[in-house]
Amino acid sequence: MLDRAGKPVKDDTTRRVRFRGAGFVPASSRFGGWIALALVIAIWQAAGSAGLVNPLFLPAPSAIVRAIYELAKSGALWQHLSASLLRIGVGWVLGTAAGVAVGFAIGLSRLARSVGITFISALFPIPKIALLPLLILWLGIGEEPKIATIALGVFFSTAISVYSGVDAVPRNLIRMAQSFNVPFATIVRKVVWPGALPAILAGFRITASVALLLVVSAEMIGAQYGIGAFVLQAGNLMQTDQLLAGVVILSVFGLVVGKVIGWLETRLLHWR
Amino acid sequence: MDLIANHISHRFGDLAVLDDVSFAVSAGEVVAIVGPSGCGKSTLLSILGGLLQPTSGAPELRGAPPADSLNPLTFVFQDFALLPWATVEENVEFPLLHTQLSATQRRALVEDALRRTGLTDFRKTYPKQLSGGMRQRVGISRALAVKPAILLMDEPLSALDSQTRELLMEDFVRLLADGGMGAVYVTHNLEEAARLADRIVVLSRRPGRIREVVTVPMTRAARGEAAAREKLLALQNQIWSLIRNEAIDAEREVQHA
């Protein structure tokens, strides 16, 4: 109630309306994650230094850093890393190129969709690493079967994310372009491609992880060099500091790829 | 150039949406299409603009379009249909990219369209940075850039607030006056129809048939004057009385669907 001067009049029953709108707006702190990570590493290091954890089962972070340093100094780190990077790079590019082409075909052509989705649905669930022995039989024991395994894994996820992205392009934009007699190729280039790009880049995040998973698995099965082979070898020799050094390198690789894709998203999807 | 709806009927599966709709839009004429919800207004517009194949009948053009028209039948969409990744000027230029025009000619057309819609200062802006009214201005600017003979407007103001709607309606009156363009204006808003149209085609409830064609008995310029308000209101009431009962039935049908 207001008095004549427009001021609120309060009495015994006057109370504030309780605020009920809090929560459900998770805002991440810029440094929160790093502080939490540093805290966990510090506790881990302290437990290792105090002798609370057997270093054979869980070496302290300092031991892992030392192992990485020794690997870098000896040149073994680069030898293993370059072998893995080459396999991932070639496999990912081949799988992505084929996946984008097939994904667009499925997204744009009725014939390709009816044939392609059937094949993808049937083949996608197969763990690609299970095909490695067959690929070795077909392609020999060199780099080819490992690269093909990665390419296959990347191909299916890429094709699915691309045609899902094409399907998600708002139909009203395509109708708009058709209403201006814009040719098919221009609609694909100027409407469908940018419209599908968010889904395609999201797919890249997944396929980068798939490639990392498959390279490690493939190298564990049949490779002399590579991070996967190194981790397996270290495990067999109970060199857990080296084993975890390999795991840390994989983690850093994943982080770097994530950052690169994040940068690409910022550059290419600035309009969102 | 005239646009003719020649005995157009349309079905979506078992659902009959339009039944034998025929009328013509002459060069420079504005025809509004009104009717109860679901009567097939937007479907009719899509058919007239060649975006949907009718089950029977056909949309037809009579006479040659203006020599400089790059897209004689041009849509203005209810949801604006702007490319979110393109700036205002890129959106306006988009329908010109595949034409034979040089970059200089394209730029001139874009400039002219932006100037006519008051968007010159917003050329580098992205759609998400614009209000609903400004986005629709971009849609109109894009339509003007191709120099249409007939604008096909699908409830272009229905997504906007009443103040913006009023401002854009004034813009439409001005653009339709000096452009020499015809228009088919689909709306559920009888005030818009009465303010903008030369003739109003009233459709019945689904399947949409022409119930009546009402001629607005004054020029568009005169409709802005105070003296015209009563006449326009009477016209709106006349049209409302034609569709009121069917609008109620259509609403109940939607509720029970």
Image (cartoon, coloured by chain):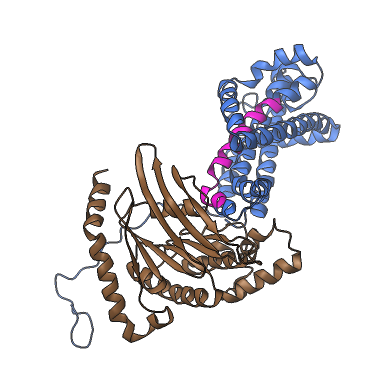
Choose top left, top right, bottom left or bottom right for residue A18. Answer: bottom left
User: Residue A227's spot in the image, x, y percent?
Assistant: 74, 28
User: Residue A205's spot in the image, x, y percent?
Assistant: 63, 39
Does the image show residue A14?
yes
Residues B226 and B208: in front is B208
Does the image show residue A240?
no
Q: Is residue B256 shown left or right of residue A100?
A: left
Choose top left, top right, bottom left or bottom right for residue B125. Answer: bottom right
Residues A239 and B167: in front is B167
Q: Is residue B32 shown left or right of residue A189?
A: left
What chain is the brown one? Answer: B
Of all residues shown, which one is farthest toward the bottom? A5
For the N terminus of chain A, the quadrant is bottom left
- Point 62% across, 53% down: residue: A181
**Prevailing secondary structure class for the magenta stretch in the rendered image:** helix
User: Residue A38's spot in the image, x, y percent?
Assistant: 60, 45
Residue B207, magenta (yes or no): no
Query: Is B71 drawn above or below residue A40 in the view shown?
Result: below
Query: Is A231 drawn above or below residue B173 in the view shown?
Result: above
What chain is the blue one? Answer: A
Q: Is residue A221 shown left or right of residue A39?
A: right
* Number of numbered labels in the structure image: 0
For the C terminus of chain A, the quadrant is bottom right
Of all residues shown, which one is farthest toward the front? B63
- Point 41% across, 79% down: residue: B219
Residue A167, magenta (yes or no): yes
User: Residue B216's spot in the image, x, y percent?
Assistant: 36, 73
Q: Is residue B154 shown left or right of residue A78?
A: left
What residue span does the magenta drawing correspond to?
A: A150-175
Of all residues shown, which one is farthest toward the left? A12
